[in-house]
Amino acid sequence: MRPIRYYDVVSHRRNPYHLRRELVQAALREGISMTARSFHTTRKTVRKWLRRFEEKGLAGLKEMSRAPHAIPHKTPPDVEVVVVKLRQRMPAFGPRRLKVTYGLEPSTWAIARILRQHGLSRKRRRKAARRRDLRQQKAALAPFQRLQFDVKDLSDIPAYWRKGSALPRYQHSCRDVRTGAAWVSYALQNTSTHAALFAGLVLGQLARYGVDLSQVTAQTDNGSEYGGMIRKRGTDAFTAVVEAAGARHTFIPPGASTYNAEVEAFHRRIEEEFYSQETLRSRPVLLAKSYAYQLWFNFLRPNFHRQTCTPAEILVEAGHAVALPALNLPPLLLDDLIPGFRPGRWSEGGYLVPYSYKWAPALPCPHAPRRLS
């Protein structure tokens, strides 16, 4: 039978401390040469562990770090402090996002190491096997060909919502599937009127900058504010606005929220990057800061799922540079666009719609903001 070598035993043990202890005891009892033959190793190895035992005792037989004592290219401590502070300020930013956003000198791997050593890295959740990767299908769409609309309830964000707050509770969102560009506005209540007004703002903005609305599809869930769960005669306000603009309104299948994944992902990002970070004490402050965030998101924030391009860059590469100003739509409080509106006058379920707005959704919306220079 072939003898088992000392190296083979050590390499397959998680903790070879006890084997080294037996080796040292044998060397003290039988000598170096005899021990080397008994353990099928070299005399140099026996001398090594015997020397460590004589210098540090049994502690010298434990596994020691093999990291180099000096690393010339290691990130300086002051830079590590900056990385840690930025991560603590923006917990949602990963190593790559931190490097791109703040122009950090260390590599992505170095930033990841710093976060891991300071206990700031999050354990990645195991993702289920991806059945369909739709990035190629989305890249085949034309800009603004498919828009996803949704409403986000902001009352479950502790950093934003406080009891008795005068801030609006609902965020109306629209996101373009091709470019990833997004627009937002706010409302005190969630009704069909507010959803229709927001659709008028977005579609009116696109039409103002030369987008052919006959090629646009507005996709929503089956919420009552979009007319999805209501059985009534005629057309609901949101669909009326979309069709009056020449676009088409479609619903996602019931219970299939992944069909609206783009706008849902935007809701998660704006909560992590904006609402959880900013101090919003009044409506004017909310509108101003959300406008700044929207400009950063549409013109400066690279999307790593879209070849590290911003929505504006994707729009230019697709040959639609003339529609670039369409991404600049300031957020509004939709309730200010309704004459005589008073909070609590209508229900929040989207069932009651003022008659004047139900059948006369003229476009471009007369309340849409003027073109910015």
Image: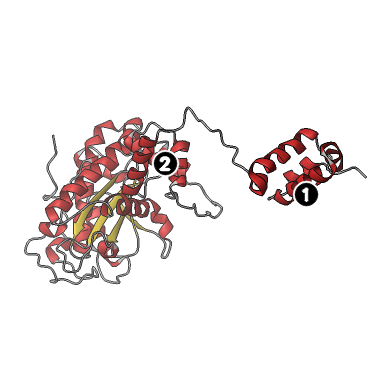
Residue 115, image x, y percentages: 43, 45
The label nearer to you, 2 versus 1, is 1
- Judge the density around disc 2: few (<14), some (14-19), many (≥20) Cα neighbours within 10 Å: many
Q: Nearer the viewer, residue 50 or 306?
A: 50
Residue 319 position in % (x across, y down): 33, 30
List the residue tagged with mark 1.
22
Q: Which residue is mark 2?
A: 95
> Can you tell which quarter of the image residue 259 is in?
bottom left
* Total labels drawn: 2
Q: Quadrant of the N terminus?
A: top right
Outermost residue, left side: 340
Dot 1: element: helix
Residue at the right extreme, as displayed: 1
The relative height of residue 22 versus residue 100 in the rendered view (above or below) is below
Is residue 142 among the parts visible in the rendering? no
Residue type, label 1: Glu
For the C terminus, the quadrant is top left
The residue at 54%/51% (across/down) is: 130
